[in-house]
Amino acid sequence: QVQLIEAGGGLVQAGDSLRLSCIASGRTFSSYAMGWFRQAPGKEREFVVAISWSGRTYYADSVKGRFTISRGNAAKIMYLQMDNVKPEDTAVYYCAEGKVPYYSGSGRPDFGSWGQGTQVTVSS
């Protein structure tokens, strides 16, 4: 069973940058896709970005060009660099791990394990 712990959320102003991190423990990190989801108040959880075990990335249109995902397999850590943030980026951000190892499909992976979330608030 994997454990995922997010950090780095906070209150920022529109146009600022923020970096979230997710540390994983419990099983082989490097074999699984990792991703970020977010949930704004009153809305359903939505996909933000993912990175496969091989480094392939998948971005939601709403964050392309502003957010960057990366991973460090040796340290079992994943990052989400958020640049030029907007008020609509306000949400709880969740780290997630892929369901199956060595996923290589063209569509984004499915996710089966989740962290507790970290709040990101962007003021205008």
Image (cartoon, helix red, strand yellow):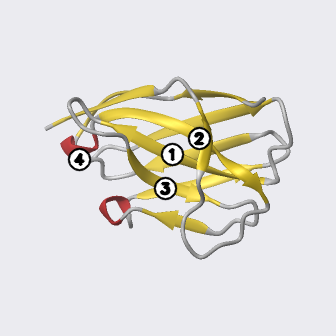
Asked if the residue at tag 1 contacts the one at tag 2, i.e. Cβ–Cβ closer than 8 Å, the answer is: yes
Q: Crowding at label 4, few (<14), some or many (≥20) Cα neighbours within 10 Å?
A: many
Secondary element at tag 1:
strand
Distance from Cα at disc 2 to Cα at disc 4: 23 Å
Amino acid on which the number 3 mark rests in the picture: Val
Disc 1 marks which amino acid? Trp
Report which residue position mark 3 lands on: 49
Residue 38: image quadrant is top left
Q: Which residue is drawn at 80% across and 44% down?
A: 29
Q: Point out which mark residue 96 bears.
A: 2
Residue 12 found in image quarter: top left
Q: Residues within 10 Å of mark 2 (few under 14, many from 20)?
A: many
Of circles 4 and 1, which is in front? 1
The residue wearing badge 1 is 36
Q: Residue at x 85, y 36 (%)?
A: 27
Q: In this view, does 46 lie to the left or right of 97?
A: left
For this orientation, the residue located farthest to the left is 124
Quadrant in the picture for the N terminus: top right
Circle 1 Cα neighbour tier, 10 Å, few/some/many (<14 / 14–19 / ≥20): many
Residue ID for mark 4 = 86
Q: How far apart are marks 2 and 1 (CA)?
A: 6 Å
| Secondary-structure class at tag 2 | strand
Which one is in front in this view, the residue at disc 3 or the one at disc 4?
3
Q: Earlier in the sequence, mark 2 or mark 4?
A: 4
Q: Provide residue 88's location: percent of width, then percent of height.
A: 21, 44
User: Of callouts 1 and 3, which one flags the residue occurring earlier in the amino acid sequence?
Assistant: 1
Outermost bottom residue: 106
The residue type indicated by label 2 comes to: Ala
What is the distance, in whole Å, between disc 1 and disc 3 at their CAs?
5 Å
Q: Residue 115: percent from the left, percent from the top? A: 57, 28
